Image: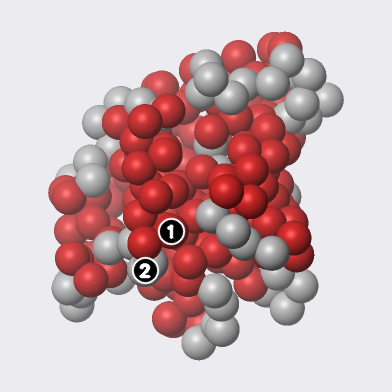
Amino acid sequence: MIRDLDRLLAPPTPTAALALEAVSRWSSAVLVDHGIRSWAWARLRAEALGLDHDPELLFVAAMLHDLGVTPAFDAHEMAFESAGGAAAWLFAAGAGWPAARRERAREVIERHMWLSVDPALDPEGHLLEVATSLDVSGVAPELWDAETLRAVTRRHPRRDFAAQFAGCIHAQARRKPGTPAARLDASQRIAEGGRVWDDILA
């Protein structure tokens, strides 16, 4: 059943809306739409699992998780998820979040590149990991309602996301061969995800 998309996609708080403004300023439109879709998939999965989580923290992490591949935030030696986590820590500090919650923003973003995240350890990290795995690599689309997947993606289209993101990850892998980006680049899962999404949206 297709959800109320306006309600599903809206930032849950004013601070969350500022995270959307930040990613819109520093990322390509394709990456912005990826962040919004990832938020939607994460929220829907949380609802399906009945998983208690912090919506504001999750939204901020979903918006900022790929800042580390953008020209303004790409660190020379640091893994892109760690660079994105550092940027999120600074955003959270500016938003007045206490120190422990700033660390949570960093952790959630760093952990989205783990192979899996235990929801008992980190519910927001788990939700962002499964959501980005769906959006990037087409992992387990059957866990979501197909009509809702299509409806959200009509609102925030993929366009050339697979090609653009594969290029970003390949650049990260070439310069930082010891990071999770190199594993993702070698796996060819971004291209496979593009094919999965072509089938979903056909």
Residue drawn at 34 percent across, 35 percent down = 24
Marks 2 and 1, how far apart at CA: 8 Å
Q: Is residue 1 left or right of residue 38?
A: left
Residue drawn at 30 percent across, 31 percent down = 29
Closer-to-camera residue (137/22): 22
**Residue 82 in view:** yes
Type of amino acid at the residue the image marks with label 1: Thr
**Mark 2 Cα within 10 Å, few/some/many (few <14, many 20+)?**
some
Q: Is residue 30 above or below residue 176?
A: below
**Residue 143 in view:** no
Q: Is residue 150 left or right of residue 177?
A: left
Closer-to-camera residue (22/65): 22
Find residue 12 and name its label: 2
Find residue 15 and name its label: 1
Type of amino acid at the residue the image marks with label 2: Pro
Which picture quadrant has residue 33? top left
Question: Which residue sits furthest bottom?
Answer: 50
Say what secondary structure mark 2 lies in. Answer: loop
Callout count: 2
Q: Position of residue 118 (x, y in %)?
A: 73, 69
Q: Is residue 177 left or right of residue 162?
A: right
Q: Is residue 89 left or right of residue 31?
A: right
- From the image, which quarter does the N terminus lie in? bottom left
Tag nearer the camera, 2 or 1: 1
**Mark 1 Cα within 10 Å, few/some/many (few <14, many 20+)?**
some
Find residue 198 and name its label: none
Residue drawn at 83 percent across, 25 percent down = 178
Residue drawn at 30 percent across, 26 percent down = 160
Q: Position of residue 194 (x, y in %)?
A: 38, 36
